[in-house]
Amino acid sequence: MPLITEADLKKQIKSRSFSPVYVLCGSEQLYIRQYTKLLTDAVTGKAPSDFNFHRFSGEVNLDTVASAIGVVPFMSEYNCVLLTDIFLDMMSADELDKLKSICKMKAEGTVLILSMPSYVPKRNAKAWEAIQKRAQKDGSVVKFDKPTDDKLEKYIAKWANQQGKFITRLNAARLIKLCGNDLTRLKNEVDKLCAYTEGEEIQMDAIDLLVAQTLEARIFSLSDQVLQGRGDDAFQTLNLLFAQKEEPVMMLYVLSNAFTDAYRVRVADESGVDVKTLAKDFDYKNRAFVLDRARRSTKTVSTEALRNCLDALSEADEKMKSVTVNPRLFLEQLTARLLLLAREGKR
């Protein structure tokens, strides 16, 4: 079978027409966890017996897994074998080949589910891709990737409505800007806001007061403030980052990325290249939304000014890595320089 969609998986669960093997993976962990539970419950029932449900995670004995697949269902329609967050990066080449062979085993009445909700292989990434391709031949592979901002806003509104609250699209967008696009984090923040909010509507001031911003979100605010010439706000944001004990090297790295995104989208616009092509060429994947955001924040700054800012950031990176500096004073001086370059480059 080919790669299937979330909707296809829902249909299979509803009709109880199961594939012999499933692989659930991708960048959206909340979806993977939810559908792993839905699929497992559908196959085993909500109170499965030890005879018909075999769960493995972390470091596993693949011979034991193979034996579990061969178990004949006892007083049940299906035998379910669930592998969740197994340590693929710790496996040898022989073990990876054995896992690939396990994914093509067919036993009457057995459903094998390989789910990776929080562990993404890096060292054995190519082998992981090969395992997915092997599973596609006889089973179903579902990749859950980060949703678009429009979908995120709908999820936020839905979660708020389930708790008797209302949130505008503008405020939902503000929440996404502060938290990023991780569904688990967004869901936790919505739950917190609903518990805090006394009236029906979740207000902007409650979001700004309660929501914990990601480092990327705060750095974007800093870059936005610099490009708009809001010096006081920029230094307040910098002070907050130091108060939160953020690592200066990481702050500089993320700030450089923010300006790189801005420069790329500017050059793409001037060259007639659309954002989708740009995102694909530079492998943005689920981070493509930052390009539209960067375009909006830099519309009043010239291309030359963006280029000069990148030069300043590159020099700062080299200096921070080569000589001993006072991190706070160093980043304050860099921020002042970027403010000056942006002001001189207004268009």
Image (spheres, helix red, strand yellow):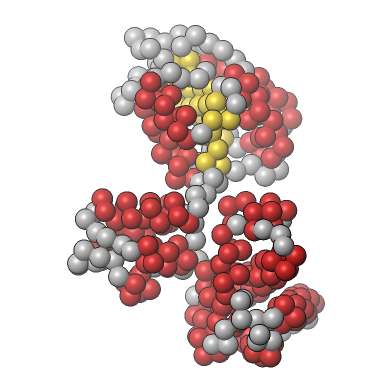
Is any part of residue 190 visible from this angle?
yes
Relative to 56, residue 324 above or below: below
- Residue 40 percent coordinates (x, y): 41, 27
Q: Return the residue found at the far left.
A: 199
Is any part of residue 95 visible from this angle?
no
Figure quadrant of residue 37:
top left
**Residue occupying image coordinates x 69% and y 30%:** 130
Q: Return the residue found at the far front.
A: 272
Q: Is residue 283 left or right of residue 110?
A: right
**Residue occupying image coordinates x 56% and y 67%:** 293
**Residue occupying image coordinates x 57% and y 75%:** 297
Residue 48 or 188: which is nearer the viewer? 188
Residue 318 or 142: which is nearer the viewer? 142
Relative to 181, residue 127 above or below: above
Residue 141 or 82: which is nearer the viewer? 141
- Residue 347 percent coordinates (x, y): 66, 85
- Residue 18 percent coordinates (x, y): 46, 19
Q: Quadrant of the N terminus?
A: top right
**Residue occupying image coordinates x 52% and y 18%:** 20
- Residue 197 percent coordinates (x, y): 24, 66
